[in-house]
Image (cartoon, coloured by chain):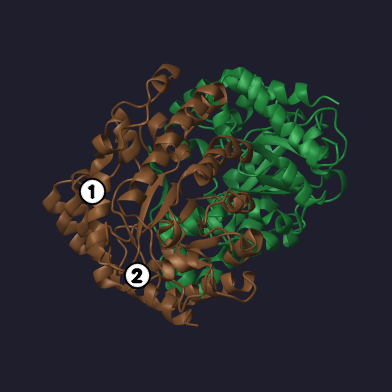
Chain colours: A green, B brown
Amino acid sequence: MIHAPLQNDRFLRALRREPVDRTPVWLMRQAGRYLPEYRATRARAGSFLAMAKNPDLACEVTLQPLERFPLDAAILFSDILTVPDAMGLGLYFVDGEGPKFERPVRSAADIAKLAVPDMAAQLGYVTDAVALIRCELRGRVPLIGFSGSPWTLACYMVEGGGSKDFSRVKALALNDPQAMHRLLDVTTDAVIAYLDAQRIAGAQALQVFDTWGGVLSPSMYREFSLRYLERIARELPRGEGADAAPLILFGKGNGAYLEELAATGAEGVGVDWTVDLGDAARRSGGRVALQGNLDPVTLYAAPDAIRREVGHALDAYRDGNGGSRDGHVFNLGHGMSPDMDPGHVAVLVDAVHTLSAR
Amino acid sequence: MIHAPLQNDRFLRALRREPVDRTPVWLMRQAGRYLPEYRATRARAGSFLAMAKNPDLACEVTLQPLERFPLDAAILFSDILTVPDAMGLGLYFVDGEGPKFERPVRSAADIAKLAVPDMAAQLGYVTDAVALIRCELRGRVPLIGFSGSPWTLACYMVEGGGSKDFSRVKALALNDPQAMHRLLDVTTDAVIAYLDAQRIAGAQALQVFDTWGGVLSPSMYREFSLRYLERIARELPRGEGADAAPLILFGKGNGAYLEELAATGAEGVGVDWTVDLGDAARRSGGRVALQGNLDPVTLYAAPDAIRREVGHALDAYRDGNGGSRDGHVFNLGHGMSPDMDPGHVAVLVDAVHTLSAR
């Protein structure tokens, strides 16, 4: 397919660590409930999942934040749990409780039944949405596709939903590490196929969300999370030349593993707000672009405080990156919340562009 | 008061980094709902708070785990929020929701009204419990007193209870840092007075729980949490000679700050399970004893896995500590949960003593 030429390539240039006029910015969960127009679309759809599974509606909400704010990238509206849903676990949502699975994976026998889903048959609604969004973007900004990380998907698959302490999935990993590795292996195969299908459908960058890697001890993180992130970084096709889609590994609580993440071969590493961006830049040593990392809660503060904190994050990165702002994609350290003020988001985006102008 | 001579000083010797025959072990929240005898006492008391405010019952539950397991220290049964309660905030508990305050601190005007509580009048029930437990222990093991850290107390004082994202307290810190420092200053004065009163009443070691320091960015951690931990370490009297009560600074998510915590002057630093104990030992360089750090969830695994993980933690510490197991107090990386199996706790305690025997 012939796509409209890209008009704003700051985000992709930053991921290649090439010079840009301003630091690019997008926000995790930028399409979300804090926007009244999102709530209206969701009300029409009836539910979050109905919206995510309808390419027209997914496209509509993906584009909404771009109408309000001069963001430098769009991210596919979807859920991190589409892959296990396609594996037959039965994803559903209970209001106020987050995602759940009807058929969680609890035993080696459950794990033995898992297989890589057929992308076209089971996840065509996602690639259809990607293709539609890419078309509707008309080259304004690049489109990011994404998946949950194998460990993070395994957490939900075994726990059957969110968890306070991840006791089931950790106990399985401790008691039967071989079974856990089988689960993670098939899930990694599925994640790679899924991200590749999104790239082929039109995604121009791909992000893996390792939301729950940080709940592990270092030895378990390396064995059950990092090992599979490394395999994705190694095996995922990126495409050729100008069409190459860089890979970003985001992880909550991944600050202790930056050197290892920078050595995976991923083009970008996303970090949460508990690491100093200057330290992160020094420790990753220019091997990857860095994405982050304002504490999302900063959006609850007053505009002056938001601008000050944006400036601190931008300058910390520059100071740790040998005086250059290149190779930085500005973002929050985690996703936005429903009660955030869109006016404060405007302040943040403007502050990033203004304070980072070269 | 003349106390019975201490029969088991492994814990205090380890905190002084002196040689011991086995690595001492105690467990955060070792007196708790996972024990049927605790649930029986609590049922008699009527509520958690009634039990904590009654020195006889607090003594009873403090001693319960020592009857079951050869633990090397007892810890006062109390709550981390007694100090703000004594400041007039009105602590109460809703089943399944954790602690709450009737009168949270929301403004500079609220903060201006806060004062260090009168220890005898407001917190005499705690020092009475300490004195009674010390007596009833008859020198079997040392008694640990404790407090919440200033930042952690401020989190509950401003949020009015637990929080998912700590948006109120962080927004206050971002919008009005001077007001936040006034809150933290008076709270620090209170914590120091409170810990000193516990020591005078008979506590033989003192632990500060910085449960929520890890939710901060590094610059905010240093400004709003670490600065006040440093003041406690500097100003808190420890007592003289053989009666000296060492100070342990425990923090969830404090792994990035070990060098700074080891330089505070505290005798011990407690770490959670997201840091490798060998790295922690190398980074703290013998300046402090280290306490931790098995993932509490390990107690849900099978006995073989528990023994294996205990061995890994013990050996990691030894390898990072120049081949010596001295200076290590074994613990979990966080508190125990109500649905844990006392039989598994027995396995853990036995594994620590067996695998660490010199």
Q: Chain of mark 1?
A: B
Relative placement, left or right, of B309 versus A140 is: left
The residue labelled by disc 1 is B128
Tag nearer the camera, 2 or 1: 1
Q: Amino acid at mark 2?
A: Leu
Label 2: which secondary element: loop
Residue drawn at point x = 46 percent, y = 62 percent: B295
Mark yes or no: residue A219 visible.
Answer: yes
Q: Is residue A93 above or below residue A110?
A: above
Tell me the quarter of the image containing the C terminus of chain A: top right
Q: Is residue B49 above or below residue A175?
A: above
**Which of the pair A184/B192 is nearer the observer?**
B192
State the CA–CA distance, disc 2 to disc 1.
Answer: 23 Å
Residue drawn at point x = 53 percent, y = 50 percent: B253
**Which of the pair B250/A108 is nearer the observer?**
B250
Instruction: Assess disc 2: are there few (<14), some (14-19) or many (≥20) residues with their C-alpha within 10 Å of its C-alpha.
Output: many
Q: In the rendering, at what x and y percent does residue B281 appear?
A: 61, 64
Instruction: Assess disc 1: are there few (<14), some (14-19) or many (≥20) residues with their C-alpha within 10 Å of its C-alpha.
Output: many
Q: In the rendering, at what x and y percent does residue A89 appear?
A: 44, 57
Q: Are marks 2 and 1 in contact (CB under 8 Å)?
A: no
Q: Is residue B236 above or below residue B37?
A: above
Tell me the quarter of the image containing the N terminus of chain A: top right
The residue labelled by disc 2 is B71
Image quarter of residue B96: top left
**Which of the pair B12/B86 is nearer the observer?**
B12
Residue drawn at point x = 22 percent, y = 62 percent: B136
